[in-house]
Image (spheres, rainbow, N blue to C red):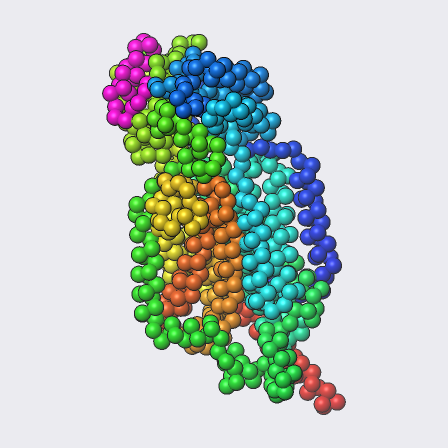
Amino acid sequence: MATFLYKLGRFAFRRRHFVALIWVALLTLAGVGAASAPAAGSTSFSIPGVEAQKAFDLLEQRFPGASADGGTGRIVFKAPEGQKMTDAANKATVEKTVKTLGDGSEVVSVTDPFTTNAVSKDGTVAYTSVKYDAPGMELKDSTRDALEKAGDDARATGLTVDVGGDALQAAAEPGAIGEVVGLAIAAVVLVITLGSLVAAGLPLLTAIIGVGIGVSTITALAKALDLGDTTSTLALMIGLAVGIDYALFIVSRYRSELAEGRDREEAVGRATGTAGSAVVFAGLTVVIALAGLAVVNVPMLTKMGLAAAGTVVVAVLIALTMIPALLGYAGKKVKATGEKRRSTGEKTGKKTGETTAEKTGENGRPGKQAKPGLGVRWASFVIRRPAAVLLLGVVGLGTIAVPATQLELGLPDDGSQPTSTTQRRAYDLLSEGFGPGFNGPLMIVVDAKNSDDPTAAATTVTDGIKDLKDVATVTPAMFNKAGDTATITVIPGSKPSSTQTEDLVHAIRDQGVDVRADTGAQVLVTGTTAMNIDFSQKLNDALIPYLGLVVGLAFLLLIVVFRSILVPLKAALGFLLSVLAALGAVVAVFQWGWLGGLIGVEETGPIMSMMPIFMVGVVFGLAMDYEVFLVTRMREAYVHGESPSQAIVTGFRHSAKVVAAAAIIMMAVFGGFISSTESMIKMIGFGLAIAVFFDAFVVRMAIVPAVLALLGKKAWWLPKWLDRALPNVDVEGEGLKTQADAASSRDGDEDRELVRV
């Protein structure tokens, strides 16, 4: 591996024009494809195998043309103080609004609140519902504009009017401000870490190119592969973060190789061979984690994971080829590690005859005149007190993880929107006028095709539901033309995201088992609320298999990389600790409301159901990045003859600064999304940022060296039979050292021949 990448890096350095041209051509091709591709809208949201999806599919079949999955809009009216909606003027405004909405495109039906009993008991609140023939996120902008304009016109008459429903839900945008802030912080960190604007600019440039190719390709293929607008969100976040980190790691190693006195082409080759090997395996762990989302069997998640994995592959390839090419263009503008300090010393009259070896000592060990850096001092402290550091780290993260035991899963609705939005105000008005459960009605589908008396079966279902707890309203059954399928609407007494509503859904389904046994009719519960409940349950059931698959595959991969059993095991256990602590922090902030005001959390509630499995996938990949970056340098020092303790210090001397910079960059990129007004994006940004902090600075920087110090040589133990069976990927660059020794030997022989002549 190292030898191949060494040759690849030198080739890219020498043929820099060719390599740069290829990447520019790929970016141009992807950009042209994205610009000329038809708009895709949103991918259809389906959850194969769950009851709510089966009910939707049955409705499409038995009620053709009813647009069971079509978008809905609601305009909620509230009369001024002392008036009622049934007053002549207010009633006229509502009727005019209904007529205007009925003339719009994509509209299937509009209800009149005065004929559908959609006026509150006290007469102060009324609403009209609009049904569309396309899903809410696929509606035309003109359709959404018409809905909002109808609300504005009604509001102008003096009524309180707000608009809700999924018709207003556009694809969640990550927010340009968050991206800009993240990139700005990343730029500052890179300048501090790499010591020059040119060196700092290389990772930023290559990351932007990689993300540009990845996201543009997703956009170009969106229509053909049914990829929605949200598919590119994860690819953007992950691609930007890992693209910067991978390039940073190679540039940093290149500067270290220059400091050893190697020429620039040789330094590029060695940096690509050693750091590039770590980048390849770090990228593979991220790809495994993201592609593994396919195990959940939710098409939307599968597509998001594969798209993001593809972007990571692009980031790895760019780091291995374009970075060496750009280093060739940069020339002497990218300086060796410590060169700026040495130049400063020369100007102030310090000795200039010192070599790098004199400053750092043999084998990279600190010389007498070298001042240990922060990473070295910290590693030395951990080695002296490994048990105390390990105990403090584990107990600290364990304490933060405690709230995760109270995790409640759900999907965000209009009730989680900021109070400044019209969707949230409409949600609150409906709760005020009709009860909290009105925002999440349940649709009961009675498939009576195999029943001797469909009408009696539907009546049995209706009467049974009325006797259940937390039921506010049950509408009479409505049959299709064939008379073999009926729908019943149930209004719960509690809000959609409450545990009471979830219990009601399960109670109806349990009751349906008895109904089928007695009448032959099948009872299915669907609707947005039921779909959310089923989605959350499906993700919860898939979490353990997914975790086992991802951790298992990565564990095998890391055994190959580190040629050790205990190091990969420690890496996996450390990850579990950091992700549990991150979930605990998410629960404390977004479910309990602790410190929520600091990041703009206006409404607490269940944690987004995708969050646990999403965090496991993304954070595991990133955690293994830090593990590979940090521990491969320790492994390299150990293989080259250093003691286990000294290898830990050497690993920190060369990698701690880079890993810390990479983590800060990741946190900046993810943290930028916390400013989003979308609760889902805000939660993802916070969860990933805090998880990176825990994993990089607590697990990798404290727990990992403490465990390695306690294990000593046992950390690198591998059964001999397994050692023989495993392929030698040479991440440490041992092959390069052998190659260099052979070259030196040949040079020596040539010199002796010349002397004899």
Q: Is residue 463 magenta?
A: yes
Residue 558, percent from left and from top: 45, 59
Q: Examine the rendered structure and indicate whether residue 480 appears above or below residue 583.
A: above
Q: What residue is shown at x 61% (from left), y 46% (from top)?
A: 214
Return the residue nearer the eye: 390 or 645: 390
Residue 9 figure quarter: bottom right
Return the residue nearer the eye: 73 or 480: 73
Return the residue nearer the eye: 486 or 262: 486
Q: Residue furthest bottom?
A: 756
Q: What residue is shown at x 56% (from left), y 53% (from top)?
A: 181
Residue 90, percent from left and from top: 47, 17
Query: What is the span of residues highlighted in magenta in the rendered image?
Result: 452-474
Q: Examine the rendered structure and indicate whether residue 700 appears above or below residue 486.
A: below
Quadrant in which the C terminus is drawn: bottom right
Return the residue nearer the eye: 754 or 502: 502
* Relative horizontal placement of residue 588, taking residue 62 as reference (left or right): left
Residue 22, percent from left and from top: 71, 52
Residue 530 figure quarter: top left
Q: What residue is shown at x 35% (from left), y 16% (from top)?
A: 475
Q: Examine the rendered structure and indicate whether residue 268 appears above or below residue 320.
A: below
